[in-house]
Image: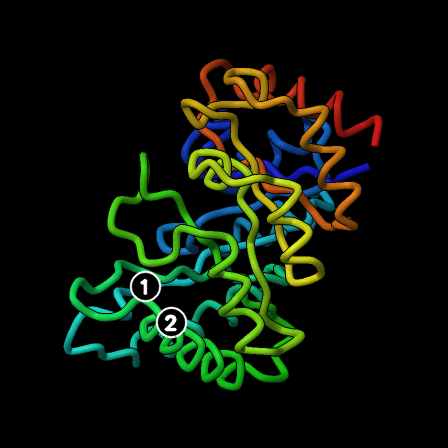
Amino acid sequence: MFQLAPNIDLLFSEAGDSAADRVRAAAAAGFDAVEMWGPTGKDIPALKEALQETGVQLTAQLAEPRMQFMIPPKNHEPFYEGLDAGVKVAQELGCPRIVVGSGTGFGGRKRQDQLDELIEIFTKGVAHIEGSGITLVLEPVNIRVDHPGALLDRTSEAVYVARGVDSPNFGVLYDLYHSTVEGEDVVAELANAGRLVKYVQIADAPGRGEPGSGSIDWAARLTDLQHSGYAGPVGLEYYPTIESAKSVRRIQELAAGR
């Protein structure tokens, strides 16, 4: 059975603005894991208390600040400083993953050169947090709807970067929503990525709502995930179109049978 982790920045807003209260609401809805975006603006001690109180695991958080690695003057120091702060929070909250992105591509420069520069940046990033116990996961995002201009929009290119970094503490975040919007073949992408997939997120398409709100065949896609060998948590990073506790029922039912 897949461990589902609702995103507390998007779901359980009915419980209020507090991340801690949303963790409690997720626990009451039957979840033993959650994910979140960045820690900025969150009461970390209160969030830690809620996680410990409920026994809920925080599966992933975003790296901050969000970087434009390829845009001159290309000062990457804020990224490494942000990793230091992010690792401190992740360790305090028991979170094993930090999600990183590529930022915007730079027009007029060869794409391959930019991908190779990402390898250099993230290789240094992994070395920078060596011994922390935290894994960095790189997320490709769609440019057709949500992230126009992003450099990394193909799963295969995220895999290329991960292979270049070549570290057990670096992998790929496979987001089934972004992949679907880009028209990728889920089975082929998962097969190519193999064990480099170290985190998964989902939302339905079109619309980026809860599973069941769009046209994705979720029974088939969960089977694809199973057959790929992925056994980690699955983040629910969607914008609910109905009350949160109702929006999760379809995917909970399907995941329970896995």
User: Helix or strand or loop: what does disc 1 sit on?
Assistant: loop
Residue at 78 percent of width and 41 percent of height = 226
In the image: residue 177, left or right of residue 71: right
In the image, what residue type sits under mark 1? Pro
Quadrant holding the N terminus: top right
Residue at 52 percent of width and 16 percent of height = 213
Residue 127 in percent (x, y) is at: 53, 86
In the image: residue 74, left or right of residue 115: left
Judging by the rendered image, the residue that carries numbered circle 1 is 65
- Could you tell which of marks 2 and 1 lies nearer the N-terminus? 1
Q: Is residue 165 above or below residue 64?
A: below
Residue 144 - label: none
Residue 154 in percent (x, y) is at: 45, 52
Judging by the rendered image, the residue that carries numbered circle 2 is 82
Q: Is residue 96 above or below residue 242?
A: below
Residue 11 in percent (x, y) is at: 50, 30
Q: For marks 2 and 1, give the CA distance.
A: 6 Å
User: Helix or strand or loop: what does disc 2 sit on?
Assistant: helix
In the image, what residue type sits under mark 2? Gly
- For residue 181, say whether it is visible: yes
